[in-house]
């Protein structure tokens, strides 16, 4: 049976008439779709961080996000987490607890809580023969896990009892109740790795000459340990007030970045941890008038750290300066922020990608994030108000 001529059957149309029909129907639809697309809000390139800045707010947000995900990936490696779990927990908690950006807060805290649950499972109790390093690491991790919502009062009681067996000198290398940080504590022997008694100048095992620890390194470690112990409710050798009281004795800061590199870094990190422990790790702003020598040291040396291409120290100096009220409006802060945004690695990290020590990968990334992010400051205050008289 033949098809009827004419009418609307597709089988009766020629190829040309079909193409004409398609154009008649489809072309107007395409024009309408194009008009809709053109009127839709277009993806923004972000707002420059300041007038003339080469990077935008979106670039900074993206850099922070990639950095945090890099840290989390490394924290999920069991070998890394076994060695540095306590530090990872504090990283996630401190970023989550003090960031102004709500999305960043939620992300860091969710990462931290997931890791804290694992950390608690892996550390159910304290070994009977735990030494001071075991006790400190478990106290650091316990405090961070507790802050992330995973308390363990039984573990805390075990740590408290174990810590009481050791002296201030065992924990801190010196007794801050009676003396300032000393200059006669030998480093581990460079030849045989032996640890020698205080005051020893030649290794008792191999007779090699010994270098001494910087008093600023000893002080920095003591600030961290006693701050954490006091906040956690466990005395790790001494009270924080006994350590911070030596602030006037550690001044003036004679070392400059162009001089002795090792001593400069020892001094710089002691100063940044004076700031951290006094502002509750970026909870409170501090007045430059309270810590004028420390503020001047940080501000004077930030640009040099940019010149030295040291992203880890740039990050620490940036976030401590921000606690004094400096912002992107300050040229020194701008130089640091610009440097960090220009030097992030393709994997989201900062620092040397060839370094096999994971601490040297995640920690510079953490400090860079801290240098870039904005903080939800809770006003101007001291974490330990009782030390105010020391600052006058």
Image (cartoon, helix red, strand yellow):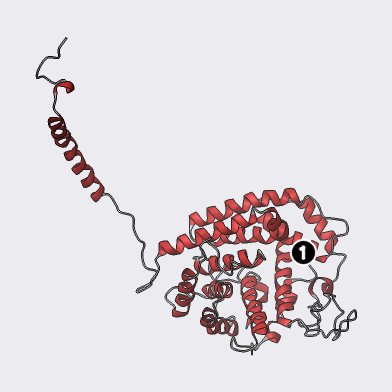
The foreground one among 118 and 1 is 1
Instruction: State the residue in front, 65 or 192.
Output: 192
Near mark 1 (Cα within 10 A), the count class, few <14, some 14-19 or many ≥20, is many
Q: On screen, 303 above or below 70?
A: below
Would you name the residue on which mark 1 appears? Answer: 136
Residue at screen point 85% across, 81% down: 198
Q: Is residue 26 above or below residue 182?
A: above
Whole-percent x and y of residue 178?
A: 81, 81
Q: Is residue 202 left or right of residue 98?
A: right
Q: Position of residue 16 (x, y in %)?
A: 13, 32
**Which residue appears farthest toward the front when viewing the image?**
1
**Left or right of residue 56: residue 189:** right
Please state which of residues 153 and 111 is positioned toward the viewer in this rendering: 111
- Return the residue found at the far top: 1
Left/right of residue 341 with respect to residue 163 in the rendered view: left
Q: Residue furthest right?
A: 204
Residue 334 appearing in the image: yes
**Which quadrant: the C terminus?**
bottom right
Image quarter of residue 234: bottom right
Question: What kind of element bears circle 1?
Answer: helix
- Looking at the picture, tell me which residue is in the foreground, 210 or 301: 210
With respect to residue 165, does 126 lie above or below?
above
Residue 368 image position (x, y, % from top left) = 54, 68
Q: Is residue 283 visible?
A: no
């Amino acid at each position: 049976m033949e098809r009827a001529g004419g009418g609307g059957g597709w089988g009766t149309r020629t190829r040309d008439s079909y193409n004409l029909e398609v154009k008649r129907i489809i072309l107007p639809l395409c024009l309408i779709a194009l008009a809709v697309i053109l009127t839709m809000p277009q993806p923004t390139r972000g707002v420059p961080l300041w007038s003339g800045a080469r990077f935008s707010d979106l670039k900074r947000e993206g850099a922070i996000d990639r950095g945090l995900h890099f840290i989390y990936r490394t924290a999920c490696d069991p070998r890394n987490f076994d060695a540095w779990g306590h530090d990872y927990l504090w990283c996630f908690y401190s970023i989550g607890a003090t960031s102004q950006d709500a999305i960043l807060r939620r992300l860091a805290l969710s990462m931290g809580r997931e890791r804290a649950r694992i950390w608690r499972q892996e550390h159910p109790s304290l070994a009977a023969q735990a030494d001071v390093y075991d006790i400190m690491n478990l106290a650091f991790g316990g405090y961070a896990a507790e802050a992330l919502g995973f308390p363990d009062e039984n573990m805390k009681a075990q740590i408290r009892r174990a810590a009481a067996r050791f002296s201030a000198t065992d924990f801190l290398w010196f007794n801050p109740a009676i003396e300032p940080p000393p200059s006669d504590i030998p480093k581990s022997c460079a030849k045989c790795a032996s640890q020698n008694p205080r005051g020893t100048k030649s290794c008792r095992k191999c007779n090699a000459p010994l270098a001494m620890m910087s008093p600023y390194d000893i002080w920095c470690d003591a600030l961290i340990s006693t701050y954490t112990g006091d906040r956690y409710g466990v005395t790790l050798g001494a009270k924080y007030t006994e350590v911070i009281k030596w602030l006037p004795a550690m001044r003036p800061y004679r070392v400059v970045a162009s001089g002795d590199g090792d001593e400069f870094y020892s001094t710089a990190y002691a100063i940044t941890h004076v700031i951290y422990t006094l502002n509750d790790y970026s909870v409170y702003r501090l007045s430059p008038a309270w810590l004028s020598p420390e503020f001047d040291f940080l501000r004077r040396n930030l640009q040099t750290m940019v010149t030295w291409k040291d992203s880890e120290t740039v990050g620490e100096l940036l976030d401590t300066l921000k606690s004094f009220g400096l912002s992107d409006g300050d040229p020194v802060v701008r130089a640091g922020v610009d440097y960090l945004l220009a030097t992030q690695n393709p994997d989201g990290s900062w620092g040397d990608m060839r370094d096999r020590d994971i601490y040297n990968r995640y920690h510079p990334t953490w400090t860079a994030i801290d240098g870039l992010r904005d903080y939800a400051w809770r006003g101007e205050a001291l974490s330990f108000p009782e030390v105010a008289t020391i600052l006058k």
